[in-house]
Image (spheres, helix red, strand yellow):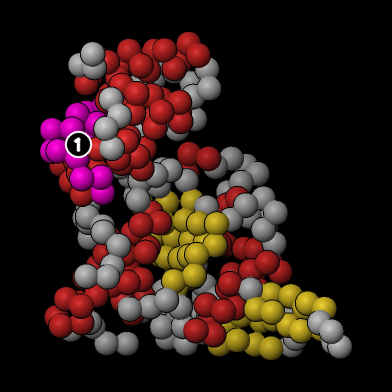
Amino acid sequence: MEMLSAKQLSVADAQMPHYVPQADECQLFEHAWRCQLPLLIKGPTGCGKTRFVEHMAARLGRPLITVSCHDDLSAADLVGRHLIGQDSTVWLDGPLARAVREGAICYLDEVVEARKDTTVVMHPLADDRRVLPIERTGELLVAPPEFMLVVSYNPGYQNLLKALKPSTRQRFVALSFDYPHAGVEQEIVRTESGVRADVAEGLVRLAQALRRLTDHDLEETASTRLLVMAARLIGAGMSVEAACRAAVVDALTDDADTAAALMEIVRGTLACD
């Protein structure tokens, strides 16, 4: 695999999803891809993990196949299954098998949400073998050099029942994500929504205030994604207070008392009328 030329990068830049690097994560991703190493991305909800993978797939010029993992996702859903046709059964590749055949980047989002048998399927792809056995057809797919396996999860959701086993984790190069630094987050909010710089700065200050909370039982805190949604509502003409209630506060809690407390923080931070 060759490094992208300056001309190739300039063409790709016009088409790739917007992403503002925080450190050396882009270089790490590209090195992992060129070294044929799988990548594990861990970080809180809405911090930019998926956008980062989309950006890197476009930057490297590779097709991206994304799977949003859930409790019912099985190994067969990933690899494929036989379907009944008019005269016979027909094999249909799942997203993981398609990605291997096409030399694509396969991204399993929130992988710990999937059933445990999915991790077993990943093991031969995530080590030096780089193969995907398809037991039902007897086929052994060998991953081409361009193929890459990327998985992500939110460490805050992990418990004894939903955690990656060491035998799985140690097959991956790991990359830790967090919410961007204030300046970077302001640029993201402004670029993604088109609001004025002062509006983006205020929303980031609000997020920082909410992230410092320790006396409210919130499963998650204000993510960059929520800030962008609020900014888009504000840009469309909604008041700051109404936008923050709809996109941030009501997205974080269903409890009326907690919502009222959060709205006080909104008003105090943004000086809403």
Which quadrant of the figure contains the N terminus?
bottom left
Residue tagged 1:
200
Amino acid, disc 1: Ala
In-image side of 268 versus 58 (left or right):
left
Of 44 and 163, nearer the camera is 44
Report the residue at 32% width, 36% height from top.
233
Image coordinates of residue 3 in percent, x first then y, are 23, 83
Report the residue at 37% width, 64% height from top.
54
Image coordinates of residue 268 in percent, x first then y, are 24, 14
Residue 38 falls within the magenta-colored stretch: no
The picture quadrant where one finds residue 89 is bottom right
**Count the marks: how many?**
1
Seen in the picture, residue 37 relative to 24 is either above or below; the reply is: below
Report the residue at 34% width, 23% height from top.
242
Image coordinates of residue 93 in percent, x first then y, are 65, 78
Which quadrant of the figure contains the C terminus?
top left
Q: Which residues are magenta?
A: 192-207
In-image side of 77 versus 207 (left or right):
right
**Is there any visible trace of residue 181 in the rendered image?**
no
Seen in the picture, residue 235 relative to 4 is either above or below; the reply is: above
Spot the residue most to the front: 237
The picture quadrant where one finds residue 133 is bottom right
Seen in the picture, residue 202 relative to 48 is either above or below; the reply is: above
**Is there any visible trace of residue 267 in the rendered image?**
yes
Of 3 and 172, nearer the camera is 3
Instruction: State the predominant SS element of the stretch in magenta.
Output: helix
Report the residue at 19% width, 36% height from top.
200
